[in-house]
Image (cartoon, rainbow, N blue to C red):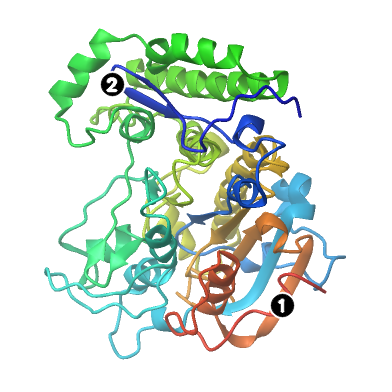
Amino acid sequence: MIITGKHLPRRTLLRGMGAAIALPLLDAMKPALATAATADAAKAPLRMAFAYVPNGVTMKEWKPAVPGADFELTRILKPLEPHRDNLLVLTGLDHHNAEALGDGPGDHARAGACFLTGVHPKKTAAADIHAGISVDQIVARKFDSSSRIPSLELGCEDSRTVGNCDSGYSCAYTNSISWRGPQTPMPPETNPRAIFERLFGDDDFNASPEARARRAAQRRSILDVVNGRAQRLMGDLGPTDRRKIDEYLTGVRELERRIEMAEKDQRRFTPDMERPYGIPPAYADYAKMMFDLQVLAFQADLTRVSTLVLGREGSVRTYGEIGVNDPHHPLSHHRNLPENIEKLTRINTHHVDLFSYFLERLKSTRDGDGSLLDHSMTVYGSAICDGNSHTHTDLPVLLAGRGGGRLKPGRHLMFEKGTPMTNLYVSLLERMDLPVEHFGDSNGKLENLSDL
């Protein structure tokens, strides 16, 4: 590290008209002559992310045959081969509270509401919804005063949050996996432009669309208004920090360009429906853009926790780009027909391939003494195992990242039948320095996440 005498606060922002861009962790934020307390405060923070997929998976093409470090990646998991050493495959975990428990049909709604809460939701389509606080919001509470954005809730499928969406269950259950409290769902934002503005625009998040349009017309790019300040700052820093800032701002510019291209794209999803504003027509481009937004938010330490719903429960999205033109949800009720199982497996593999893209972006982004992937814990999975029978046992779950050295990945861990999924969340909260004795229907912690 080159000592320049320039010591920057960790929360340094590049401000300009209608913009405030946080910076990634720089050497100048942890100077060599700093006290131990200052150096400790400048360490790369630990992040937590969750990616949710709907309608279950083809488990025979998901679950590895043997536990331990010598497991073979199955067909669905094969796209994760480059990240095998940063991956824990977890099998045997259940969400008992997603079962009917006397409430009859509604497994998709219960799955979405239960995934991050471990709570059985109240069956209602009215305003008296009731679930539980989700694990991401426990983390958000901790960093509420220290992060510009306590949490990010993102989604790749726009849908209603009121009314009846699944056999008498409110749409809030189906469409929101994040819950601030038992009666307060956190609906995911699905427009990349709105997310981008929240991350890098000014603090007036409640401005009208007209006001935002006027501001957009006054400036060509967010980076244009802070470029002069960035250049002056880089002149005071060493070469390593200059490279970090240049890489980061290049990433911001590239993402901004892609969003602008999506906004100008006039293609339609169907002949009768206009493409939503700012959303790429191709699903893979859409999902990657949402993953990129999370990477930038983590890189700039704008937030420490995020959730992404790759598809809402009961999703009827089609995937023509991979040759699957049948709606997802009906395919998940495959009736053991080989052709339907094959199409469902291709959808499952496509989702994992997109998750692999996210891991690659985290892995290739410098962060402190390692990468964002080194300093993250990312859960990927579903609260439905087999979509054909709506089971909620032995769920498809992945845990990626090294958790700042608090996880030992590169293994397949098989847990005893009946182990609550919420035991995983208790273990992850402990690694976020947020120990809890109980969460949802937990009955302990998961063993062996950090050792053999």
Instruction: List x then y, in percent, for residue 85.
Output: 79, 54
Q: Nearer the viewer, residue 439 or 246?
A: 246
Instruction: List x then y, in percent, for residue 408.
Output: 76, 64
Residues packed near mark 2 inside 10 Å, few (<14), some (14 to 19) or many (20 plus): some
Taking 403 as reference, is 160 left or right?
left
Secondary structure at badge 1 equals strand
**Residue 18 - label:** 2
Q: Is residue 55 depicted above or below 311 in this figure? A: below
Secondary structure at badge 2 equals loop
Whether residue 434 is visible: yes
Instruction: List x then y, in percent, for residue 26.
Output: 62, 32
Does label 2 or label 1 sit earlier along the sequence?
Answer: 2
Residues packed near mark 1 inside 10 Å, few (<14), some (14 to 19) or many (20 plus): some
Identity of the residue drawn at 66% across and 73% down: 91
Identity of the residue drawn at 44% across and 48% down: 326
Task: Identify the image quadrant of residue 274.
Answer: top left
- Residue at mark 2 to residue at mark 1: CA–CA distance: 50 Å
Q: Amino acid at mark 1?
A: Met
Taking 385 as reference, is 28 left or right?
right
**Residue 414 - label:** 1
Q: Is residue 327 depicted above or below 321 in this figure? A: below
Q: Amino acid at mark 2?
A: Gly
Q: Nearer the viewer, residue 408 or 55?
A: 408
